[in-house]
Image (tube, rainbow, N blue to C red):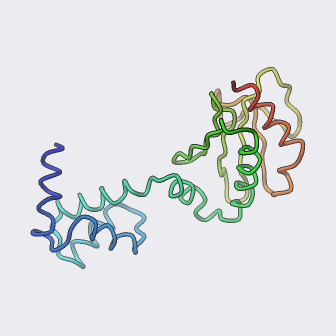
């Protein structure tokens, strides 16, 4: 399969009039919600055959998985939550050089040697912060893990940047310290 794909990429300029990188540049200026929309656009507007159009759209999507792209996709339509997300990152990155922030498709993992926090834009108005703090009692604010299941022991629902306060920072620090 790899060889066939490489042959297709090599033949692309001759068969479609543009290289893969040129097609990717064109697709970056568009925003298609569905794969087939991109394929149909290339077929109708540029006369690309279905096979090449499908390959171009598929390979273009793979590039949209950089950490920045993943976070941008998570917060699309939820931009009002970005200040809360950034405030959380500001807090956890002060804990030490051993903190790794790893964006995924729907969440951002915060890891020391083990994951100790999980940031998820849950709704258009709320971020769910999952914490892993074993043997810690729940409170009205520090709830059971809820939708995070066994990935976390607790959840804090955040709707305002002012909720990234000293108490929350202390819980994050405790989770960080237990993640050695």
Left or right for 106, reference 156:
left
The x, y position of residue 106, in whole percent, is 56, 47
Vertical placement of residue 95 versus 38, above or below: above
Marker count (numbered): 0
Q: Residue at x 71, y 65 (%)?
A: 80
What is the quadrant of residue 96 in the picture? Answer: top right
The x, y position of residue 22, in whole percent, is 27, 71
Depth check, front residue: 41 or 7: 7
Vertical placement of residue 179 versus 19, above or below: above
**In the orientation shown, which residue stands out farthest toward the bottom?**
45
Q: Residue at x 72, y 30 (%)?
A: 132
Q: Residue at x 74, y 51 (%)?
A: 90
The N terminus, quarter of image = top left
The x, y position of residue 73, in whole percent, is 53, 58
The C terminus, quarter of image = top right
Left or right for 115, reference 54:
right
What is the quadrant of residue 45 in the picture? Answer: bottom left
The x, y position of residue 34, in whole percent, is 38, 62
**In the orientation shown, which residue stands out farthest toward the front?**
97
Left or right for 13, reference 156:
left
Left or right for 37, reference 149:
left
Depth check, front residue: 158 or 170: 170
Q: Residue at x 50, y 58 (%)?
A: 69
Vertical placement of residue 116 versus 84, above or below: above
**In the orientation shown, which residue stands out farthest toward the top?**
135
């Amino acid at each position: 399969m790899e060889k066939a794909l490489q042959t297709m990429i090599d033949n692309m300029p001759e068969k479609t009039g543009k290289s893969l990188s040129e097609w990717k540049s064109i697709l970056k200026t568009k925003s298609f919600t569905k794969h087939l929309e991109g394929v149909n656009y290339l077929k109708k507007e540029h006369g690309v055959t279905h096979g090449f159009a499908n390959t171009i759209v598929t390979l273009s999507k793979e590039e949209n998985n950089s950490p920045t792209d993943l976070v941008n996709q998570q917060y699309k339509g939820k931009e009002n939550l970005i200040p809360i997300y950034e405030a959380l990152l500001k807090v956890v990155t002060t804990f030490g050089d051993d903190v790794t922030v790893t964006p995924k498709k729907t969440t951002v993992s915060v890891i020391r040697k083990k994951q100790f926090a999980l940031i998820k834009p849950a709704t258009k108005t709320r971020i769910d912060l999952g914490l892993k703090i074993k043997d810690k009692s729940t409170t009205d604010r520090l709830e059971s893990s809820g939708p995070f299941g066994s990935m976390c022991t607790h959840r804090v629902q955040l709707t305002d940047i002012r909720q990234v306060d000293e108490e929350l920072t202390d819980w994050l620090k405790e989770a960080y310290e237990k993640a050695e």
